[in-house]
Amino acid sequence: MIEMKNVMKKYPNGVVATNGISVNIKQGEFVYVVGPSGAGKSTFIKLMYREERATSGEIIVNGINLTSLKNKKVPFLRRQLGVVFQDFKLLPRLNVYENVAFALEVIEKEPIEIRRRVMEVLDLVGLKHKARMFPNELSGGEQQRVSIARSIVNIPKVVIADEPTGNLDPETSWEIMNLFEEINSRGTTIVMATHNREIVNTIRRRVIAIEGGMIVRDEHGGEYGYEI
Amino acid sequence: MKFRTLNRHVRESVKSLGRNSWMTIASVSAVTVTLLLVGVFAVIMMNLNKVADDLENDVEIKVLIDETADEAAEKQLMDKIEKLPDIEEMTYSTKENELKKLVKDFGEDFKLVEQSNPLRNVIYVKAKEPQKTAAVAKKIAKFDYIFDVKYGEGKVEKLFKFLNTSRNVGLVLIVGLLFTAIFLISNTIRITIIARRDEIEIMKLVGATNSFVRIPFVLEGMWLGILGSIIPIAVVATLYHNIYKIVKPRLEGELIQMLSFSPLVYQVSGLLILIGVLIGVWGSFMSVRKFLKI
């Protein structure tokens, strides 16, 4: 599903963010990416949806080779992925329904299909009754659920999440995690960068620890492993 | 591209004008001010050009034929002149005709000389390009049976030099003005786009293609250009209409004439809309490009 071979990323300012990362993530897996701040987690995540381009090495996502992928083709890679962020990245001027539908509109789906799919996912994340509300009228947890709905509305094979619970209180974080588990149970691969020790230690899944741009630990059912 | 998508782009671009109303007003004002300058300037330039053309076209060569030339010799001379390159037209006028003109211009007193007409038969020659008048005159002067060739030597050269310089200066000013306009407008549009970079980022992250992101912005630039050209067109048309009404009667029968309202004002209006649209589209295109690299 996601395969990296000896991936190195050096930024123009000379910082080496990942230094020879090799990893293989299979379809349907649930993977936590942990590590201290500045260790290269975010770069590792960004490489997967080609926000950043690897300096050397090979990355294959869902059969697409990202190293040889032309910039013009990147949109078609992203249509097969869902991305969730710590800061939700919702459009403040659009209501809940429109925010989710946006992801389908920009890839030119049929209006009838958009309507059907959006209502489906809003039902899944439990926000059908708030479809007409705007982001600033929702709690943080609800906003993150909208953003998750948007990420899965086009039925991606992989959902990539960069600290999705980073801005949420513990209780809300659990609700969000339940949602991710639910999505994962339907066969979607999930790669999640996180600092949430409690979650990693409770919902035991594969843990990839990154330090200094390298994978220092990769174990199934592993622990968070860092002191806060 | 699907029709539905195009429809969406148009809707989005219009909506965006309303949503970012302050930036819209700023951009439209920038377009308005520059196009107003360009419009007024273009009208002035085109009229100056017309004046220059009028003056230039009035320049002609007066060939005075020697008295010793008989009819055959005159005929021969005219044939020779006609064969010269760069001759636009040629008219023959007898000395009696010349005297009539003189009498008409300067009064009955000249009738006294009617008995012994001191004037000569004349050929009026016009060069194809006014700038070549001097060269043509020199060639004619070499022919036989020529008494004299007059074309306002010295004065004509000075006039042409002056007209050429003022045309070039005008051109440079217009180009400079256009560059300022482009700079001003693309900057204003850039600000509206910076304010919406989040939107662009999200579009790119959910898999929108570059052209999908860009088209609404480019359309928005087009609307800005069109909106910005309305006031300048109205002002230019009204001003010209009124000035024309006042100036035209005073130029009656003069050599120098103003260009008439139509088609000048329509041409300038078309030019202003075109410039507005081009500047808006180009400004948007260039500004949004930077934010597509996500």
Image (cartoon, coloured by chain):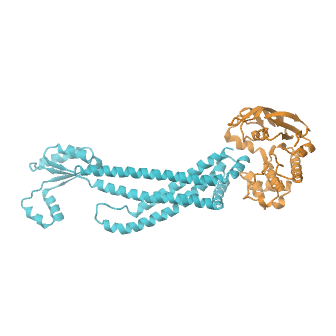
The quarter of the displayed image where residue B225 is located:
bottom right
Tell me which chain appears orange. A
Q: Which of B75 and A217 is in front in this view?
A: A217
Residue B44's spot in the image, x, y percent? 40, 59
Viewed as shown, does residue A121 lie left or right of B151? right
The quarter of the displayed image where residue A91 is located:
bottom right
Q: Name which residue lies at 29% across and 48% down.
A: B131
Q: Residue furthest left?
A: B115
Viewed as shown, does residue A173 lie left or right of B166? right
| Total marks in image | 0
Chain B tint in image = cyan
Q: Name which residue lies at 40% across and 64% down.
A: B261
Figure check: A12 above or below B147: above
The C terminus of chain A, quarter of image: top right
Q: Name which residue lies at 69% across and 41% down.
A: A73
Residue B260's spot in the image, x, y percent? 38, 63
Q: Nearer the viewer, residue A193 or A227?
A: A227
The N terminus of chain A, quarter of image: top right
Decide if residue B202 is in sight here.
Answer: yes
Viewed as shown, does residue B292 lie left or right of A25? left
Residue B30's spot in the image, x, y percent? 54, 58
Residue B263's spot in the image, x, y percent? 42, 61
